[in-house]
Each structure stands twice: as structure tokens, then as C-alpha cells.
Image: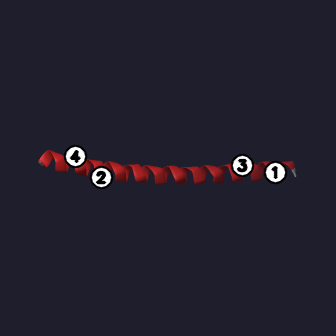
Amino acid sequence: MELGAWSLELGAWSLELGAWSLELGAWSLELDILYINVIICQYINKKA
């Protein structure tokens, strides 16, 4: 029985980690978009 409870706890922890990973991925994507926008702005400013 203890193994089952431990397994459940591990599953919950894994789920939490997955959610955290997803949040990190979304944040990373946002950062990438921001970075691309900065590069585009610099490129436009150089052409002007």
C-alpha cells in the first residue's frame, strides 16, 4: 500500500513538473517573440 501512495505522490509531482515546464515553455516563447521584435526594430532603424 505504501508503494501505491508513493507512486501517486510521484505522479502528482510529475504533473506539477509538467505544468511548470509548460509555463516555462510559454515564457520562453514570449521571450523569443520579444527578441525577434527587437531585432526587426533594429533592422528597420538601420535601413531608415
Instruction: Please give left or right for residue 25 compared with residue 34 in the image.
Output: left
As drawn, which residue projects farthest toward the right?
48
Which residue bears the numbered disc 1?
44
Closer to the eye: label 4 or 3 = 4
| Between marks 3 and 2 in the image, the one whose residue lies nearer the viewer | 2
Amino acid residing under circle 3: Ile
**Going from the N terminus, do you reach mark 4 or mark 3 first?**
4
Crowd rating for badge 1 (residues with CA inside 10 Å; few <14, some 14–19, many 20+)? few
Residue contact at pointers 4 and 2, CB within 8 angstroms = no
Identify the mark at residue 7; answer none if there is no mark: 4
Amino acid carrying label 1: it is Ile
Amino acid identity at mark 2: Ala
**Residue at (12%, 48%) from the top-left corner?**
2
Q: Name the residue under label 3.
A: 39
Q: Which of marks 3 and 1 is nearer the N terminus?
A: 3
Q: Nearer the viewer, residue 41 or 9?
A: 9
Amino acid on which the number 4 mark rests in the picture: Ser
- The structure residue drawn at horizontal position 81% and vertical position 51%, both measured from the top left corner, is 44
Q: N-terminal of the two: label 4 or label 2? A: 4
In x, y percent, where is residue 13? 30, 51
**Rounded to the nearest whole Å, what is the CA distance between mark 4 and mark 1?**
55 Å
Q: Nearer the viewer, residue 14 or 36?
A: 14
Tell me if label 3 and label 2 are in contact, CB under 8 Å: no
Structural crowding at the residue carrying mark 4, measured as other residues with C-alpha within 10 Å and reported as few (<14), some (14–19) or many (≥20):
few
Q: Residue, x 88% and y 52% (percent of image)? A: 48
Residues at discs 2 and 1 in contact (Cβ within 8 Å): no
Residue behind mark 2: 12
**Image position, residue 37 (x, y; %):** 70, 52
